[in-house]
Amino acid sequence: MESSIYLIRGVNQKVVPALCLKDSNDYFIFAQLRQANQEDIFNTQDTKTMEKFNRGKPDREQIKIRKKYEVDTIYIGQPEGLNSKSVVMVKKLHKVSKSQLIKKIAEVDYDFVLKCKELIKQVKEIARLQKELQQLKRKLQLATINNEKYSHYEKRIGEVLKAIGYKSGKKRKNKPYENLREVPNKGYIKIYYGGR
């Protein structure tokens, strides 16, 4: 049953194709499929190949390279029985009973099921880290307002950003005097002696 693609009737009574990820006695867990677009197919390659393809092209002609936190689909190609190349959406899971299964339409390698399960774990972990990041940012904000030490929050925020795949570190300004009034170095300095 696992690694089979079925037409299923979801909660909203809509019939959708889905890949079986778990076969239990009482219920089944299915991940919904959708038609693959150019970006889905492009992102199956390794990063170097994708960067080489995009190099020198104007922004509008470049195909987006997804970051670690943006990946939520597995490309399965076009197995026999499907009308088009497809991807499995691991965020759209359906828990269905046997009566909600309509018919089997295709079969894929079990490797895809393992990849889906691995990606589901990764997506859940990233969601947990993003929630932690929001809480840490709130704590850091409160600590700065209350004039408390917050270096441990900054350190943890850096670790979480790295784990999620965001660019870590503060944006540094190129100005020489960051938190001070800047010394004027252009043009004439006007001196006002009071009066009107």
Image (cartoon, helix red, strand yellow):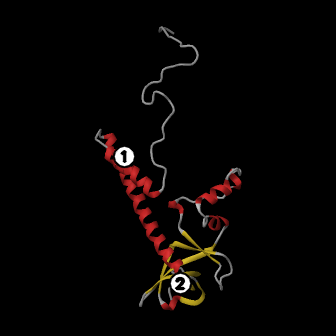
| Residue that mark 2 sits on | 3
* Percent of width and height locating residue 8: 55, 85
Badge nearest the viewer, 2 or 1: 2
Residues packed near mark 2 inside 10 Å, few (<14), some (14 to 19) or many (20 plus): many
The three-letter code of the residue at mark 2 reads Ser
Q: Which of 129 and 192 is in front in this view?
A: 129
Is residue 75 visible in the rendered image? The answer is yes
On residue 154, the disc is: 1
Q: Is residue 36 above or below residue 187?
A: below
Identify the residue at horizontal 45%, vertical 45% (top origin).
169
* Percent of width and height locating residue 9: 55, 84
Q: Nearer the viewer, residue 93 or 153?
A: 153
Identify the residue at horizontal 45%, vertical 58% (top origin).
164
Q: In this view, does 3 lie above or below 191?
A: below
How many marks do you count on the picture? 2
Q: Nearer the viewer, residue 78 or 14?
A: 78
Q: Is residue 148 above or below residue 98?
A: above
In the displayed structure image, the side of residue 143 where residue 62 appears, left or right: right
In the displayed structure image, the side of residue 95 where residue 60 appears, left or right: right
Give the SS element for disc 1.
helix
The mark nearer the N terminus, 2 or 1, is: 2
Is residue 64 visible in the rendered image? The answer is no
Give the SS element for disc 2.
loop
On residue 32, the disc is: none
Q: Distance between the residues labelled 2 and 1?
A: 44 Å
The three-letter code of the residue at mark 1 reads Glu
Q: Do the residues labelled 2 and 1 touch (CB within 8 Å)?
A: no
Identify the residue at horizontal 42%, vertical 87% (top origin).
24
* Percent of width and height locating residue 188: 57, 13
Determine which quarter of the picture holds residue 144: top left
